[in-house]
Image: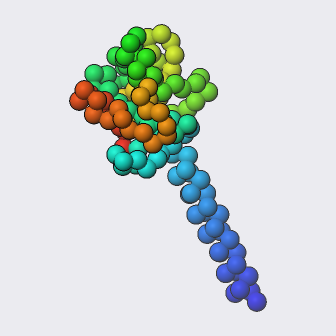
Amino acid sequence: MKVSTSLVALAAMGFVVFGSAAVVQADEYGPLKTKATSAGKVLTNPDGMTLYTYDKDTKDTSNCYGECAAYWPPAKATATDKPVGDLGIVKRKDGTLQWADGGKPLYTFANDKKPGDVTGNNQNGVWHVVAEH
């Protein structure tokens, strides 16, 4: 009787440990998500819209403003959002906050109409989807 009780307890502990590991993995992108697309599994905003990086940005600095930001809206972060894993938050020159991956600011693309669209990938050779890590 004692052996079976111990096995049940061990099985329950294993469930708790493995169950909590699954929760941590699900949260590794904070409010951002991943989605399977024609360009592979990519990082998306909370609405499922594909996120991109811009080759002309520098570490922790966006160089996309004005007309550029109209076509490539920044992936906005809020003051209550917290960095998670490689995902950080950068401050734009207008004071707004933007998600970044490894210091590269993230954007959506105005011509992507539905979740999973990747029409901005390799635009002008400088815009690239963010593949899942």
Q: Nearer the viewer, residue 101 or 13?
A: 101
Q: Residue at x 61, y 69 (%)?
A: 14
Q: Nearer the viewer, residue 67 or 64?
A: 67
Q: Quadrant of the N terminus?
A: bottom right
Coordinates of residue 15 in the picture (x, y in percent): 63, 67
Q: Residue furthest left?
A: 125
Q: Is residue 74 visible?
A: yes
Coordinates of residue 27 in the picture (x, y in percent): 55, 46
Q: Residue at x 49, y 37 (%)?
A: 114
Q: Nearer the viewer, residue 44 or 85?
A: 44
Q: Quadrant of residue 10?
A: bottom right
Q: Is residue 75 above or below residue 2?
A: above
Coordinates of residue 85 in the picture (x, y in percent): 46, 41
Coordinates of residue 9 in the picture (x, y in percent): 70, 75
Q: How many marks?
A: 0
Q: Residue at x 32, y 26 (%)?
A: 54
Q: Is residue 4 above or below residue 132?
A: below
Q: Residue at x 54, y 26 (%)?
A: 77
Q: Using residue 110 as the reference point, say whether residue 24 is left or right of it.
A: right
Q: Is residue 85 visible?
A: no
Q: Residue furthest right?
A: 1
Q: Quadrant of residue 123?
A: top left
Q: Residue furthest bottom?
A: 1
Q: Using residue 15 as the reference point, say whether residue 113 is left or right of it.
A: left
Q: Using residue 32 as the reference point, say whether residue 51 is left or right of it.
A: left
